[in-house]
């Protein structure tokens, strides 16, 4: 299932996605107004946009599909039913395609979230209520035959606590890996990412206009979606005139990186017949790992607005310790 925005999301009030299967949303993007009759929208509005949150098990396939086959042909698919094989394949793609500081995101998730055996010792220092969120880590039907894995309910379905279960939960909940596809005129309003992560985005086709502002410009931003940065109304947002930001255009083959807590907005531009297509991944790094930790802890303690599962929250402290060991000395 993908989030499809028939009229784009250039403003905060536009964030009303339709949840559709990918195979149904893509034809809507290609055919324009045809098919819009399902929705109470003005079909003449441009900017249709698709957000596809890619599962961890599918992310290597996406990287392969949009990479030069001459570079990736020697990377073995392996036995895809095994989590370890998928992890090795993903690490091979990252080593080939990405700068080293951007790699290893799913690797740390697998290391600190995927092993249930260490959970007891990991939770000893937890200073938030791991079960205080909207989707408790409820054990599933205890009458089922025990196969060596605990079972939990997530999104209304029963899952076994296998090596990939909790890491995949984090990927899905945070939209860690995403494919963006959209018409000219589509894009995203000005915002900072919820969990203070950094991110990279690779432009596969079409063109995209970017607007980036560092954290110290926050007092001039008027909050999330408060300014249309590509057509600002200075009478309504006069402080934005003082903002010291960056703007540029990326085309096929270009990549963008922005650090944690940077404001960013995008707008698809270029030829109408060429949709914008891009791949993106969030990043935890030495510049943001403590901010990400604080944001995750907030989500795990917020019973009114958190989508974090209690089981995920119970294991995240192991990740915090892993990040501190990896990055802590560099920022002390």
Image (cartoon, helix red, strand yellow):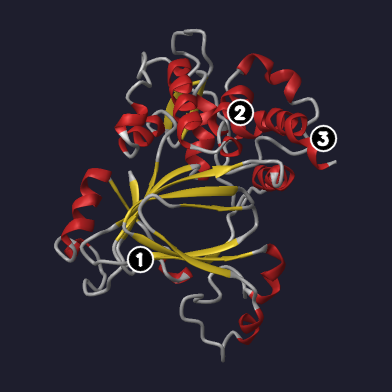
The residue under label 2 is 108
Mark-to-mark CA distance, 1 and 2? 33 Å
User: Split into 4 quadrants, where in the image is the N terminus?
Assistant: top left
- Where residue 252 sits: x, y (%)? 35, 53
| Residues packed near mark 3 inside 10 Å, few (<14), some (14 to 19) or many (20 plus) | few
Residue lying at 50% horizontally and 65% vertically, measured from the top left:
265
Quarter of image, res 166: top right
Instruction: Judge by depth and name the residue closer to the eye, 188 or 13.
Output: 188
Q: Which mark is residue 329?
A: 3
Q: Secondary structure at mark 1?
A: loop
Does residue 184 appear anywhere in the picture?
yes
Furthest residue to the front? 70
Of marks 3 and 1, which one's residue comes earlier in the chain? 1
Observer-side mark, 3 or 1, equals 3
| Residues packed near mark 1 inside 10 Å, few (<14), some (14 to 19) or many (20 plus) | many
- Where residue 212 sits: x, y (%)? 56, 65
Quarter of image, res 138: top right
Mark-to-mark CA distance, 3 and 2? 18 Å
Q: Secondary structure at mark 2?
A: helix
Q: Which mark is residue 186?
A: 1
């Amino acid at each position: 299932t993908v989030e499809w925005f028939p009229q784009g999301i250039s403003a905060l009030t536009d964030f009303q996605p339709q949840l559709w299967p990918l195979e149904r949303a893509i034809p809507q993007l290609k055919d324009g107004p045809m098919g819009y009759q399902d929705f109470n929208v003005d079909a003449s509005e441009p900017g249709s946009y698709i957000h596809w949150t890619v599962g961890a098990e599918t992310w290597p396939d996406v990287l392969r599909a949009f990479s030069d086959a001459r570079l990736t042909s020697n990377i073995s698919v392996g036995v895809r039913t095994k989590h370890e094989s998928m992890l090795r394949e993903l690490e091979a793609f990252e080593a080939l395609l990405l700068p080293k500081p951007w790699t290893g995101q799913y690797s740390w998730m697998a290391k600190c979230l995927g092993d249930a055996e260490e959970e007891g010792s990991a939770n000893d220092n937890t200073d938030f209520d791991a079960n205080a969120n909207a989707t408790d880590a409820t054990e599933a039907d205890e009458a089922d035959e025990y196969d060596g894995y605990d079972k939990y309910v997530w999104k209304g379905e029963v899952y076994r606590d296998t090596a990939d279960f909790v890491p995949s939960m984090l990927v899905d909940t945070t939209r860690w890996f995403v494919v963006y596809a959209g018409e000219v005129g589509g894009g995203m309003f000005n915002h900072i990412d919820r969990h203070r992560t950094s991110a990279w985005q690779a432009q596969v086709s079409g063109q995209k206009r970017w607007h980036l502002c560092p954290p110290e410009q926050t007092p001039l931003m008027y909050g999330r979606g408060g300014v249309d940065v590509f057509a600002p109304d200075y009478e309504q947002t006069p402080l934005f005139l003082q903002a010291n930001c960056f703007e540029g255009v990326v085309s096929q083959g270009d990549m963008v990186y922005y650090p944690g807590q940077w404001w960013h907005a995008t707008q698809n531009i270029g030829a109408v017949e060429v949709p914008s297509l891009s791949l993106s991944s969030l990043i935890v790094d030495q510049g943001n790992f403590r901010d990400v930790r604080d944001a995750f802890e907030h989500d795990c303690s917020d019973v009114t607005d958190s989508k974090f599962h209690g089981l995920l929250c119970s294991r995240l402290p192991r990740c915090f310790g892993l990040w501190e060991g990896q990055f802590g000395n560099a920022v002390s």
